[in-house]
Image (tube, rainbow, N blue to C red):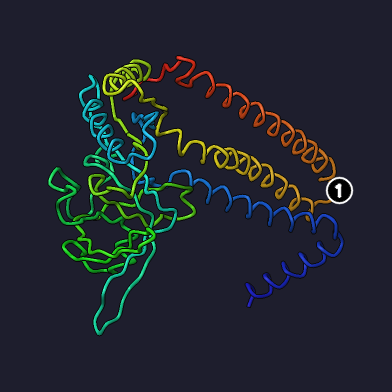
Amino acid sequence: MFLRESILQDIRYAVRAMRNSVGLTTVAILSLGLGIGAGLLARSLQAFLTADLGYDPKGVLTAQATLHGSGMDSQRNASVGEQLLAAFRSVPGVQSASWGRISSSTKLSQLVVPGPGGSERRSGSYLNFISPDYFSTRRTPMLAGRDFNAGDSAASPAVAVLSEDLAKVLFGGVNPIGLRFRENDGQANGRDYLVEVVGVARDIQYRRPDYGPLTILYRPVSQCASLCWGIGFYEIRAAGPIAETTKRLESAASVVDSRVSLKLGLLSNVMDSVLHRNRAMALISTAFGLFVGLLSMMGVYGVKEPAKSVFAWHWARNQATFCAWYLARRCAWCALARLLARGLASPQHGCLRESFGE
């Protein structure tokens, strides 16, 4: 009984205090709401920034190869592409290398899994043609089955590795290794053919992690044939200074064919460019949450002791305004410095000083 009376007395006191200090009560409620919102935002962004990308980009160089004067000669491009892969793998310091080509079709691959009673399960997917060692170079684990090997040639049966998400879409909870699906080549003739699943790889984030994984179908680059254009791209994991490795790769490419040009970069920069804005947002939201938390405490204190909190309220408001201006200016300078650093660190300037394995 005593406890009940005490609670009711506290409630009546709180109602009278809020009624007598409507302005400060509103400030307190809004401050608490903003504080909770800022805290949740900072927490979600922190989870976003620490999300598993499905691969390890550190120490991996990317190289986009172009054979000038080859035109649309797919056979010539494929031949030079194979020679470049062998040359890159023989470069001192290179631990592993992979080769990939882009499909000439702009449409998603249409996949069909036959079901019981004539039913079908359909899904569209992005198509990547890759060589053996693609997943080991990225350090992406195989969840089931195997990677591609030298036996997966143009003359052998069509095989595929599915991303984890695509395997769930097509086959649900069933182990897909050894099962088959129909794939449409996406060309004008719309030819369908059977493809056997030989492996399932962990999902790789090719975009912002909060967007979720893409459904990816991996096919051997040796089975690309006329479906691909250009030489393609390479990913090289190496140890040692980047500048030295870059020069060795360019030299190896010129030995294969003097008409080959390479556009080199770092795999880590691919996601860094996507995540940079979100890192800045996480910093700002965290700082915002701290200041809003301070303001909320001022507001709650003001409900109970309005006369004593006037000075504290004005001080908090001035501090919050100054800090917001300071953070905005600092983020602008950081963004400018980052752009300048990237420009100076580009291969064209010859100032690559980062070392792999650090």
- 291 sits to left or right of 160: right
Q: How many marks?
A: 1
Instruction: Tell me which residue sits at (26%, 45%) in the image.
Output: 221
**Residue 63 appears in the rendering:** no
Would you call the spot at circle 1 few (<14 residues within 10 Å), some (14-19), or many (20 or more)? Answer: few
- 98 sits to left or right of 2: left
* In front of the other: 236 or 83: 83
Residue 213 image position (x, y, % from top left): 41, 54
Q: Amino acid at mark 1?
A: Ala
The residue lying furthest to the left in this view is: 151
Question: On the image, numbered disc 1 is attached to which residue?
Answer: 307
* In front of the other: 38 or 27: 38
Instruction: Tell me which residue sits at (70%, 29%) in the image.
Output: 329
Image quadrant where residue 253 sits: top left
* In front of the other: 349 or 67: 67
The residue lying furthest to the bottom in this view is: 117
**Residue 237 appears in the rendering:** yes
* In front of the other: 189 or 19: 189
Quarter occupied by the N terminus = bottom right
Residue 108 image position (x, y, % from top left): 41, 58
Residue 4 image position (x, y, % from top left): 65, 75
